[in-house]
Image (cartoon, rainbow, N blue to C red):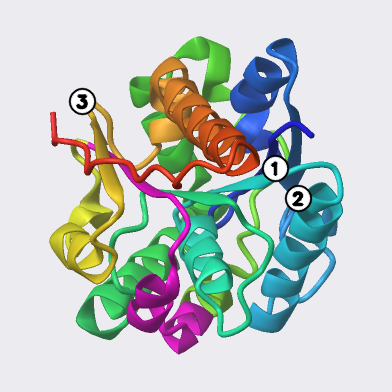
């Protein structure tokens, strides 16, 4: 049974943000599923709630787990939801977790400031989409630039989705996660603010810093991010092989920041 990769997008975007990763994985013979969360992409007409979002992740993970061990990959809001899901009280069938651009606790002044920023941008003419297009044009390579918004932008649910994240108990979830875990951050990502705390809460986790990237690490340097996913896949394959051979399960060393 081959490793299955489940991909969970961040706020406002959709499953299309993972086009580069899907193409890479499929080209190398790996099955993958890119999830659309409620209120986003093909599910834009639905309401966003935490329960509905976690249920969407659970559906995708359990379907994939029937075919092989699952590497769950989440970006930004999708990363936080994936942490909460993997570290839930009832451990789901996740063999490894890659949480990207999400090492910040979604609460307090930081979350309030983020919500205020999104509201301010949305109040601008054209919902401020010219700012988004400008950022993508100046920071994202041409080959992946369209992927982030190809499924549409979930502007109507972004504030509600952000507010709901405060209900997640991320510290408790991190303490419960025992499967291989990677934090992948862009060097200039604003959500690195609690990076050290996340490492203390999950001391077995590996930290990967992608140089010269911001929050949009998956589309800014897709080849490096794809390599991080392949690291997760290889680790799960190695663990599965060790278990089949009756060997002790190997634990990864914490990656050095570079």
Q: Which mark is first along the chain, 1 or 3?
A: 1
Pick the front one: 194 or 138: 194
Residue nearest the viewer, comparing 91 with 185:
91
Residue 244 falls inside the magenta stretch: no
Q: Residues within 10 Å of mark 3 (few under 14, many from 20)?
A: some
Label number found at residue 52: none
Q: Quick check: can you spot residue 127?
A: yes
Judging depth in this view, the residue of 143 and 247 nearest the camera is 247
For image coordinates 55% across by 11% down, the residue present is 143
Residue at 70% of width from left, 82% of height from top?
Answer: 51
Q: Earlier in the sequence, mark 2 or mark 3?
A: 2
| Residue indicated by mark 1 | 15
- Residue 25 left/right relative to 228: right
Residue 50, given in percent of the width and then of the height, sits at 63, 80
Q: Which residue is mark 2?
A: 41
Alpha carbons under labels 2 and 1: distance apart: 7 Å
Residue 211's disc number = 3
Q: Position of residue 207 (x, y in %)?
A: 25, 44
Task: Verify CB contact (< 8 Å) between mark 3 and mark 1.
Answer: no
Instruction: Give the number of the mark in front: 2 or 3.
Output: 3
- The quarter holding residue 134 reads top left
Say what secondary structure mark 1 lies in.
helix
Q: Disc 2, disc 1: CB below 8 Å?
A: yes
Vertical order, 20 against 193 (above or below)? above
Task: Identify the secondary structure beneath mark 3.
Answer: loop
The span from disc 3 to disc 1 (Cα, nearest Å) is 25 Å
Which residues are the magenta region?
Answer: 163-186
The C terminus is located in which quarter?
A: top left
Query: Residue 200's x, y, as percent?
Result: 18, 67
194 relative to 163 in the view: left or right:
left
* Residue drawn at (54%, 58%) of the image: 78
Nearer to us: label 2 or label 1? 1
């Amino acid at each position: 049974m081959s490793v299955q990769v489940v991909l969970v997008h961040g706020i406002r975007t959709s499953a299309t943000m993972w086009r580069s990763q899907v193409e890479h994985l499929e080209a190398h013979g790996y099955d993958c599923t890119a999830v659309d969360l409620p209120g986003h992409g093909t599910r834009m007409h639905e309401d966003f709630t935490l329960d509905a979002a976690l249920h969407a992740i659970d559906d995708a993970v359990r379907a994939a787990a029937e075919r092989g061990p699952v590497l769950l990959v989440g970006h930004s809001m999708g990363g936080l939801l994936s942490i909460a899901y993997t570290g839930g009280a009832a451990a789901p069938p996740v063999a490894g977790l890659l949480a990207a651009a999400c090492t910040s606790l979604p609460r307090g002044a930081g979350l309030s400031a983020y919500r205020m920023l999104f509201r301010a941008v949305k109040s601008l003419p054209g919902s401020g989409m010219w700012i988004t297009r400008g950022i993508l044009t100046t920071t994202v390579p041409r080959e992946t630039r369209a992927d982030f918004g190809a499924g549409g932008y979930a502007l109507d649910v972004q504030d509600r989705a952000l507010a709901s994240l405060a209900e997640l108990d991320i510290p408790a979830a991190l303490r419960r996660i025992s499967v291989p875990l990677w934090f992948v951050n862009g060097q200039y990502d604003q959500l690195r603010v609690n990076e050290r705390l996340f490492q203390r809460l999950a001391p077995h986790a590996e930290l990967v810093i992608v140089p010269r990237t911001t929050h949009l690490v998956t589309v800014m340097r897709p080849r490096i991010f794809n390599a991080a996913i392949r690291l997760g896949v290889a680790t799960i394959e190695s663990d599965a092989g060790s278990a089949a051979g009756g060997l002790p399960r190997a634990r990864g060393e914490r990656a050095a920041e570079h």
